[in-house]
């Protein structure tokens, strides 16, 4: 109990890592998520991230080409990365100065 071991930080980390690795000797494979999904999967994904869309609205966006999608036979297929990127690009900061400037410019034009 009175044994004190002095080790450098790197050596200590290596020892701890080795001992913990022995405890968890079963290697866990990283989960790979499938990137493609159907229309209903895209709706669920968007809802999980706080972008609530109706099925009709998503169909309208795909028909107009405003949202990235592909067709596989008669089915629409969406890419997880593309959908999240698209949704992020649709949002803007609450205090966006460009909106304020645009509103002021419109107001000034009306007052002439």
Image: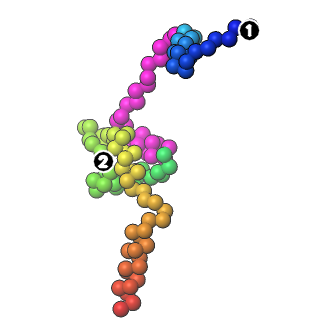
- The kind of secondary structure element at disc 2 is loop
Membership of 33 in magenta stretch:
yes
The C terminus sits in image quarter: bottom left
The x and y percentages for residue 12 are 56, 16
Give the vertical position of 108 relative to 103 (above or below): below
The N terminus sits in image quarter: top right
In magenta, the rendered stretch is 25-48
Label 1 close to label 2 by CB (< 8 Å): no
The x and y percentages for residue 46 are 45, 46
**Residue that appears at 40% across and 83% down:** 107
User: Closer to the camera, 20 or 25?
Assistant: 20
Give the vertical position of 20 relative to 57 (above or below): above
Left or right, 65 with respect to 5, comes to left
User: Closer to the camera, 81 or 12?
Assistant: 12
Label 2 sits on residue = 68
Q: Residue furthest right?
A: 1
- Mark 2 surroundings: few (<14), some (14-19) or many (≥20) residues within 10 A: some
**Can residue 80 be seen in this snapshot?**
yes
Give the vertical position of 83 relative to 92 (above or below): above
Left or right, 92 with respect to 79, comes to right
Label 1 sits on residue = 2
> N-terminal of the two: label 1 or label 2?
1
The residues tagged by marks 1 and 2 sit, at their Cα atoms, a distance apart of: 66 Å
Membership of 2 in magenta stretch:
no
**Can residue 16 be seen in this snapshot?**
no
**Residue that appears at 37% across and 79% down:** 105
């Amino acid at each position: 109990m009175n044994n004190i071991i002095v080790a450098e930080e790197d050596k200590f980390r290596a020892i701890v890592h080795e001992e913990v690795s022995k405890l968890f000797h079963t290697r866990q494979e990283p989960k790979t998520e499938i990137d493609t999904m159907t229309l209903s999967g895209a709706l669920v994904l968007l809802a999980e991230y706080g972008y609530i869309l109706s099925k009709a609205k998503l169909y309208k966006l795909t028909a107009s080409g405003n949202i990235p999608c592909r067709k596989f036979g008669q089915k629409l297929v969406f890419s997880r990365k593309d959908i999240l990127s698209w949704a992020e690009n649709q949002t803007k900061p609450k205090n966006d100065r460009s909106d304020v400037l645009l509103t002021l410019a419109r107001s000034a034009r009306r007052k002439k």
